[in-house]
Image (cartoon, helix red, strand yellow):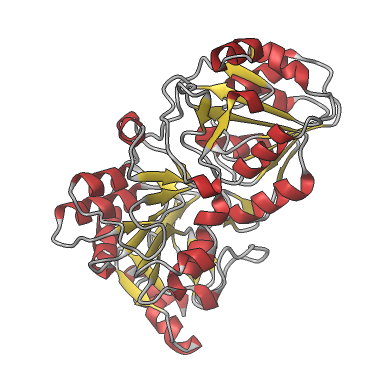
Amino acid sequence: MATSHEEYQRKLRTPRQAIDLLRPDDVLAVPIGPGQPAALLSALAERDDWNGFTLFSGLLIEPYPILLRPGVRYISGFYGPIERMLAASGAAVDYLPADFIGWERYARAARPRALASTVAPMDERGFFSFGLHAGANFESFMAAARDPERVAIAEVVQDMPHVYGLGQYGGHRVHVSAVDAVVESDRAAFTLPEQPVTDADRAIAAHVEALIADGATLQFGIGAIPNIVAGLLADGGKGDFGIHTEMFVDGIMRLHAAGKVTNHKGIFDGFSISTFGAGSPELYRWMHRNPEVRMLPVMQVNDPAVIRQNRRMVSINGAIAIDLNGQVMADTIGPRQYSGVGGHELFVVGAHDSLDGRSIICLHSTATVNGETVSSVVPALPAGTPTTTPRHHVQYVVTEHGVANLGMLTAGERRAALLAVAHPDLRASLG
């Protein structure tokens, strides 16, 4: 019987050799951001016989040349700068209008023949940790690994942290014997640049911090504001927090370091739970084999029925605009796709329905459009705007000018509350 090391060597391929496992008309699914096998995806351009080939992913970390080729289609569950650039250039890019759980449903139904993911270096027992990403791809990857008619490729990233999972949900790992090929990446783990901080960000974060009570379970979205909030909580007098979040960010590490996290939260007690992580190299070193951190598939993290079981659940997410009915535009700018739904509404609903929970949506009161300052609180969303979160799910709305608690307000009362947090110079123009 071959040892794990022998199995590793037998399956080791260069990126160019690994893509020969794919057919010209295959469907290849890979995770978003930190789970993306960048060396493998870059090597796809070294073949010129793609015809009807489809890539399913989101939040690209590199502008892979293959995506500009004829006969190649890209389905994205979440737009970032590269997706926006590809769409503007006329590439065959199409958005999947689904939340993060919806991606997993799509992957199960579509059954892509090929799956690939980054992994941490193999441990002494022959297991690869999926590191910074479980998300919507874990179950599909494992299904492909079990199926002799499908392909599962592991791309080893040398500085990817080994992050633990829970055994009942697959342990966040795969054995070398289960994969079809191993690629050793020449990339470092994807890191998230530190976000610039504005005075408006600081004012919003202060309002949010005041809404969080001792013993709250916290979810943080991406961006400067959630990290500022985490810093305020780390330095303040509150504590006994739990962590149940879609995305693991640097601010959570600071809360742990300050002794503010106990994780007595009602579900997955004792662990800070996430489905993917993105941040600094320092965060990744801290997450490596950290017994307090667990990475779980998206269905166990983002399901509102799970989220609402947490004690005093608080979700903190961003938005681009909100109308006076309380409808939130967070993933589009008018009809143009800008980012993605992700876990936005899932955590809004889960936190809103948690006992003593609070759902918080943050946005700057103004934006600059074509050199002009415009209000982010608007009488009505632009025609053709897909609503990210409907009005009946929206609870707290925070701008730098204050807090509007829309819970239990009538339509007329909502308008008054939202006008009160709009920019003072623009309120009169909103009606």
Tell whether 91 sits left or right of 213: right
The residue depicted at 47 percent of the width and 64 percent of the height is 307
The residue depicted at 46 percent of the width and 43 percent of the height is 165
- Residue 159, quarter of picture: top left
The residue depicted at 60 percent of the width and 25 percent of the height is 154
The residue depicted at 54 percent of the width and 17 percent of the height is 185
Q: For the N terminus, which image quadrant?
A: top right
Tell whether 168 sits left or right of 29: left
User: Where 366 sits versus 40, above or below?
Assistant: below
* Residue 134 point in image, percent of width and height: 53, 42
Closer-to-camera residue (5/163) = 5
User: Where 331 sits versus 361, above or below?
Assistant: above
- Residue 9, quarter of picture: top right
User: Where 303 sits versus 197, above or below?
Assistant: below
User: Where 117 sits versus 6, above or below?
Assistant: below
* Residue 147 point in image, percent of width and height: 76, 34
* Residue 91 point in image, percent of width and height: 73, 34
* Residue 149 point in image, percent of width and height: 81, 31
Outermost residue on the front side: it is 1
Tell whether 141 sits left or right of 127: right
Closer-to-camera residue (220/170) = 170
Closer-to-camera residue (92/103) = 103
Closer-to-camera residue (4/253) = 4
- State how many labels appear: 0
